[in-house]
Image (spheres, grey):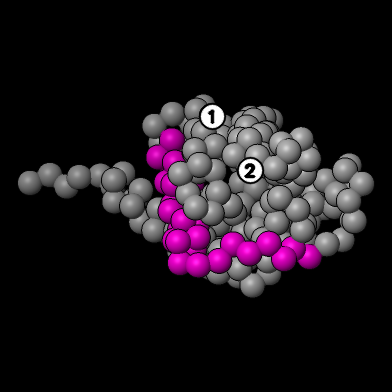
Amino acid sequence: MSFSNLQKLFAEALGTGLLVATVVGSGIMAETLSDGNVAIALLANTVATGAILFVLITALGPVSGAHFNPVVSAIFAFRRELSWGFAIAFMVAQIAGGFLGTLAAHAMFEESIIQISVKARSGPSQVFSEAVATFALVFTILMTLRARPSAVPAAVALVITAGYWFTASTSFANPAVTIARVFSNTFAGISPADAVWFIAIQFVGAVTAWWAADRLLAPQSRD
């Protein structure tokens, strides 16, 4: 079954919106119920995010490829599997959808609809963590697409679930999600100044993962 460009863009906006609504909403719920236990709150936030990723990629993958992430769309454009014009359209849809997802989460929990985060996520370790997290995500996507395409939803959900815990930044790994979280002064938030560094290094991590995957998957020359 083929899908129109409008359907693909809608899928990217909707998927990113539901992803962000889950990240922000589960963060609010977790912080409310955890009685100050940050580890429990993070665990709840992690489980919800990993679960929704599996669902969204499974459901919307056949429509748009389920990127939900500007760096993923950019890498597919670099690989000439997506035109740059359409990749940019995907990015706009993802960012818009993510922003609306934040507003939806706030509305569900009776928070102020429009917020600007003051939550600091700064320092070299946090920035480096985002490079590692984004590398892990993009590398997982590219390698799993070659090894077992049907496993991509599970692989992406699992690498993000792991990233919440093995990176100091809790694995944003997504510029659209990072921008959306700027507008939430809650558990999931990030200050605008720190978001700029996160987004820049996410693209670096993604390009590095593309290079590494291409080196591993390149056909070997025969002597």
Occupied quadrant, residue 99: bottom right
Q: Judge whether residue 86 is colored magenta.
A: no
The Cα atoms of the two marked residues, 2 and 1, are separated by 26 Å
Q: Residue at x 74, y 63 (%)?
A: 117
Q: Secondary structure at mark 1?
A: helix
For the residue pair 34 and 148, the one nearer the viewer reads as: 34
Query: Whole-percent x and y of residue 80?
Result: 49, 56
Q: Which residues are magenta?
A: 116-144
In the image, is 17 to the left or to the right of 200? right
Query: Whole-percent x and y of residue 215?
Result: 29, 51
Above or below — where is 6 with respect to 150? below
Q: Secondary structure at mark 2?
A: helix
User: Which quadrant holds the N terminus?
Assistant: top right
Residue situated furthest bottom in the rendering: 193
Q: Which residue is mark 2?
A: 38
Please state which of the two labelled residues, at mark 2 or mark 1, is closer to the viewer. Answer: 2
Say which amino acid is labelled 1. Ala
The majority secondary structure of the magenta stretch comes to helix
Q: Which residue is mark 1?
A: 154
For the residue pair 72 and 50, the one nearer the viewer reads as: 50
Viewer can see residue 23? yes
- Label whose residue precedes the other's in the sequence (2 or 1): 2
Viewer can see residue 85? no
Query: Whole-percent x and y of residue 97?
Result: 77, 52
For the residue pair 1 and 201, the one nearer the viewer reads as: 201
Q: Judge whether residue 124 is colored magenta.
A: yes
Q: Residue at x 29, y 45 (%)?
A: 216
Residue situated furthest left in the rendering: 223
Label 1 Cα crowd, 10 Å radius (few <14 / some 14-19 / many 20+): some
Say which amino acid is labelled 2. Val
Above or below — where is 27 with respect to 75? above
